[in-house]
Amino acid sequence: MTAEAAKKPPAHPSGDKRFKLLEVAMKRHQFRQDALIEVLHAAQELFGYLELDLLLFIARHLKLPPSRVYGVATFYHFFTLKPQGKHTCVVCTGTACFVKGADALLAAVSKQASVASGATTTDGELSLLTARCLGACGIAPAVVLDGKVMGHQDAATLLSELKGRLPDGTLGPA
Ligand code: FES
């Protein structure tokens, strides 16, 4: 075994390929500790949410105390430690989106799907999340639906888009 290999933390015992992909993402950042936020983003994209086991895996690879990784993951709004629904709707509630009616979008989805912001519908179909600024203020109000950024949204457009993706029954009557 080379000295390099000996230093490397062991692969994840589950054999889940996503851990391998996450390792590649960390490698791209040269396992730098200051890339923690980017790494957490990559992890969330791969796994949908940041479970404890995943945070420990990241901590080991970046040689950071687990408490620091946990602290960062819980501090930022865009990270979630709970499993999400099959579909994710992130409504940006940053200033630019707020003045263009983001609160109405949030209220419309929340009411129709009977789900609070930050929660998942009881059938596990839809998670409704908020972001502080998606960096797309020019197309406010912006929403990310299943990873796709959509600008200039209004409640009717967003609800009809959701209706096309969700099974009957997840959204209540208009
Ligand atoms: S405030 Fe919504 S994208 Fe910036």
Image: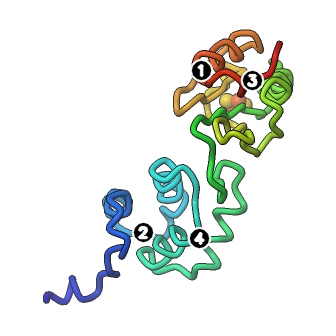
Dot 2 or dot 3: first in sequence order is: 2
Label 4 with label 1: CB-CB less than 8 Å: no
The residue where tag 3 is placed is: 171
Residue at 71%, 28% in the rendered image = 170
**Residue 35: image x %, image y %?**
48, 62
Residue at 70%, 63% in the rendered image = 74
Dot 2 or dot 4: first in sequence order is: 2
> Quick check: is the Cβ at mark 3 less than 8 Å away from ligand 1?
no
Residue at 66%, 57% in the rendered image = 82
Q: Nearer the viewer, mark 4 or mark 1?
A: 4
What separation in Å lies between label 2 and label 4 (alpha carbons)?
Answer: 20 Å
What separation in Å lies between label 1 and label 3 (alpha carbons)?
Answer: 20 Å
**Residue 4: image x %, image y %?**
21, 83
Q: Is residue 137 visible?
A: yes
What separation in Å lies between label 2 and label 3 (alpha carbons)?
Answer: 43 Å
The residue tagged with tag 1: helix, strand or loop?
strand
Q: Nearer the viewer, residue 131 or 94?
A: 131
Dot 1 or dot 3: first in sequence order is: 1
Dot 2 or dot 1: first in sequence order is: 2
The amino acid beneath tag 1 is Met
The residue tagged with tag 2: helix, strand or loop?
loop
The residue tagged with tag 3: helix, strand or loop?
loop
Label 2 with label 3: CB-CB less than 8 Å: no
The residue tagged with tag 4: helix, strand or loop?
helix
Task: Tell me the tag on residue 32.
Answer: 2
